[in-house]
Amino acid sequence: RGQITGTVAEKHLPTNTPLRRLVRLHREPDGAFVKAVWSDVATGAYTFNGVRHDGKYFVTSFDHTGTYRAVIADNLTPTQL
């Protein structure tokens, strides 16, 4: 099994602002939903543990406050645990 990690942040200069958002993990290429986690309120970090390490994934993050548009990060390869 593997792990996928990342962060959700609002882009600012000189530093980015971490955001708490629901992040959804999907399998490439069929888009099948795998699982969802909330990013950390203080750091914006998220982690998906226990995912198959032999495939590619993408994550989506929608802004439940309605301030920002959705963000997609694709072509993610899990690190093997």
Image (cartoon, rainbow, N blue to C red):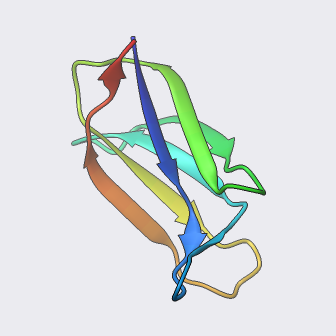
Question: Which quadrant, please, contains the C terminus?
Answer: top left
Query: Measuring 26% from the left and 34% from the top, which residue is drawn there?
Result: 77
Foreground: 44 or 61?
Answer: 44
Percent across and percent down for residue 13 are: 51, 89
Percent across and percent down for residue 61 are: 55, 62
**Compared with residue 38, is residue 3 higher up or lower down, i.e. above or below?**
above
Residue 56 placement, left or right of 44 = left
Foreground: 15 or 3?
Answer: 15
Q: How many marks?
A: 0
Q: Quadrant of residue 51?
A: top left
Query: Measuring 51% from the left and 74% from the top, which residue is drawn there?
Result: 70
Query: Measuring 43% from the left and 34% from the top, which residue is drawn there?
Result: 4
Foreground: 54 or 10?
Answer: 10
Query: Measuring 39% from the left and 10% from the top, which residue is drawn there?
Result: 1
Q: Quadrant of residue 64?
A: bottom right
Residue 58 placement, left or right of 17 = left
Percent across and percent down for residue 43 are: 68, 55
Percent across and percent down for residue 36 are: 61, 40
**Compared with residue 77, is residue 81 higher up or lower down, i.e. above or below?**
above
- Extreme residue in the front direction: 14
Residue 61 placement, left or right of 28 = right
Residue 73 placement, left or right of 61 = left
